[in-house]
Image (cartoon, helix red, strand yellow):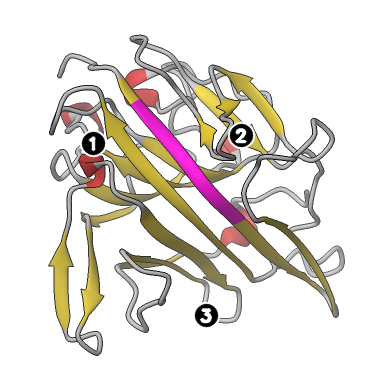
Amino acid sequence: MPTLVQFLISVLMLLLFVQVSSQVNQFLYAGFKDIGPNNLTLDGFAKIEKNGIIRLTNHTNNITGHAFYPLPFQLKNSTTGKAFSFSSSFVLAVVPQYPNIGGHGMAFTIATTKDLKGLPIQYLGLLNSSNVGNFSNHLFAVEFDTVQDFGFDDINDNHVGIDINGLKSNASVIASYYTDNDSTKQYFNIKSGKPILAWVDYDSSLNLVSVTLSSTSSKPKKPTLSFNVDLSHVLHDT
């Protein structure tokens, strides 16, 4: 198991759009400088910096930090039980204390509770040794992983993965994005400290999760990673 090295994670902007029947539920954070406790829930070592970004962790070993939208969303049709489509976009940066040496990364997640009993290091603050992989977790996550954990069959120490109820990714790919009219794949280092733009989308009609990454604000047409899954069997109603 690799040794955890101190690192910082900064989330610069977050947008989530959830389609609920004929209505639209959404929230937008254009920075976090003036966000109050009623609009964002932080725990662990997470804090809002003076420049308006969220720092999820600091250079202390074996710690976690969470930032959650504080109110529940209706995620499924109450009549059919079908999960609604959703889209989210955010900017993140992983800033290691030492160049090219990172901690275990971070994750975007939709969970049944803000009070996750997750452990640090390889559990990414989401799960722990007693519940990892359980269907009762009802957890969806996209991980940005910077340590290769052989116990979870990680493909390398610089990858993006789609996780359902566990941390052994259902689908993963080396960190990359498409450029040049979506014909060229550009690989990048998650822990470079540079901003990474990410879009996480779910198409309920296709049962398709797509993760699209870029180094600019322009969203590539071709996603970095896609995975077919019916989230109706994963997500709770809220």
Label 1 close to label 2 by CB (< 8 Å): no
Read off the magenta span: 8-14
Label 1 close to label 3 by CB (< 8 Å): no
Rendered-image quadrant of the N terminus: top left
Dividing the picture into quarters, in which one does residue 222 lie?
bottom left
Q: Position of residue 176 (x, y in %)?
A: 21, 62
State the residue at coordinates (44%, 27%).
132
- Which label was assigned to residue 206? 3
How many numbered discs sit on the rendered protein? 3
Dividing the picture into quarters, in which one does residue 137 lie?
top right
Residue sitting at the far top: 61
| Mark 2: secondary structure | strand
Say whether disc 1 or disc 3 marks the residue closer to the N-terminus: 1
Say which of 217 and 85 sits in front: 217
State the residue at coordinates (80%, 34%).
36
Q: Main secondary structure of the magenta part?
A: strand
Say whether disc 1 or disc 2 marks the residue closer to the N-terminus: 2
Could you tell me the amino acid type at mark 2?
Answer: Ala
State the residue at coordinates (59%, 51%).
234
- Which label was assigned to residue 146? 1
Instruction: Report, in whole angstroms, how far the alpha carbon at label 3 lies from the one at label 2.
Output: 29 Å
Q: Nearer the viewer, mark 3 or mark 2?
A: 2
> Does the image show residue 166?
no
Establish if 47 lies above or below 34. Answer: above
Dividing the picture into quarters, in which one does residue 66 lie?
top right
Say whether disc 3 or disc 2 marks the residue closer to the N-terminus: 2
Q: Residues within 10 Å of mark 3 (few under 14, many from 20)?
A: few
Instruction: Report, in whole angstroms, how far the alpha carbon at label 1 lies from the one at label 3.
Output: 30 Å
The residue singled out by tag 2 in the image is 67
Please state if 171 lies on the left or on the right of 134 as rendered.
Answer: left
